[in-house]
Amino acid sequence: MEEVRGSVTDRSWGLTLGAIALRRHTGQLTIDSDNKRYCIAFDDGAIVAATSPMAADAIARVALTNHFITSTQVPDLTRRLAQAPDRDEVDVLAEAVRFSPSQVLKLRHRLVAQRAARTFSVERGDFVLDGRITLPVFPEVLVDHRHAIYLGVRTNLSEQRLLDDLRQLGTHFMLRPEAIDELPRFGFEPNAQPVLDALQTGTSLPELEAAHRELDPRFAQAIIYALVSCSACVVQSRITPAPLVQRNVTPRRVTSVRPLNSKSSERMSALTSIKVLRNGRDWIVRNPLKKA
């Protein structure tokens, strides 16, 4: 394929990753930002490898935070890794701790997912997408792009970028019926169910917050962002009826009314008056703006 270049701020990063995966791309995405490089390798749309320059994504830190190792093992593992720079880092760790094959595979999955998700922390930078994979790839390591996107939004995307991206995506969202069976691939937490239920009939973020005040707003925002990025959620155009405008009725000025007598007749010429008949008697309506 031809090389594709762009900026991480061209559109929401989730849409960029989602488009690469949905097109079933095979190749490598390289992002350069502030003299740091992040890479994600794709095989037929699945994420198969990733690198990150951040210390939080180092193998020992990832193994520790995901409870593969204990804090007392970190110094020894760090030393072993430094002594074997040409060996695969997971192999070095697995050999030292004596991991089972299933533990090794689980750690590789977690490592790739976390490093791919880290790209959501990049605020500025340029990327290149091509058809060559230079990262080491291991069999059976296939990370679903939906999980990586949700993880990235949930843990790395800044609050302001999340809000700005959502405003660009739309305001009213509805889950595609055919996407319901794919929801487990995102890795949503169990308490995401109220949000997913509301999306099946269509909802907005203000409606979700009003109906489920116990939910963290960022939690609902991350779910919707990930679903839209992976084309699992459609953005609806919702026409809001114009609000009814209540007209302010100006009250009429109260006029004074008195019976017509002889004295009133003499002063009739000095008044602007209206003669009315009420109950068989003549009445005169005094003009309140003119002195009698």
Image (cartoon, rainbow, N blue to C red):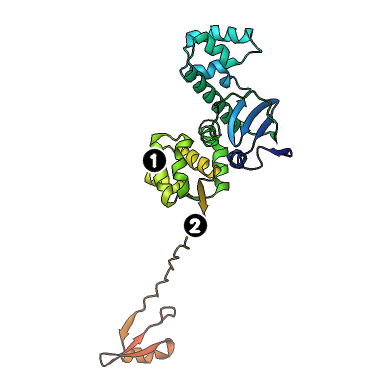
SS of the residue at dot 1?
Answer: helix
Q: CA distance from mark 1 to mark 2?
A: 24 Å
Where is the C terminus found, in terms of image quarters? bottom left
Q: Amino acid at mark 1?
A: Gln
- Side of 172 where 281 appears, left or right: left
Q: Which residue is mark 1?
A: 193
Give the x, y percent position of residue 92.
57, 12
Q: Residue furthest front?
A: 139
Q: So how many labels did they put on this image?
A: 2
In the displayed structure, 195 sits above or below 251; it is: above
Closest to the observer, 156 or 16: 16
Q: Earlier in the sequence, mark 1 or mark 2?
A: 1
Give the x, y percent position of residue 208.
42, 46
Q: Name the residue rendered at 58%, 32% in the picture.
A: 47
Q: Amino acid at mark 2?
A: Arg
Q: Which residue is mark 2?
A: 238
- Side of 124 where 191 appears, left or right: left
Give the x, y percent position of residue 84.
63, 9
Q: Are marks 1 and 2 in contact (CB under 8 Å)?
A: no
Label 2 environment density (alpha carbons within 10 Å; few <14, some 14–19, many ≥20): few
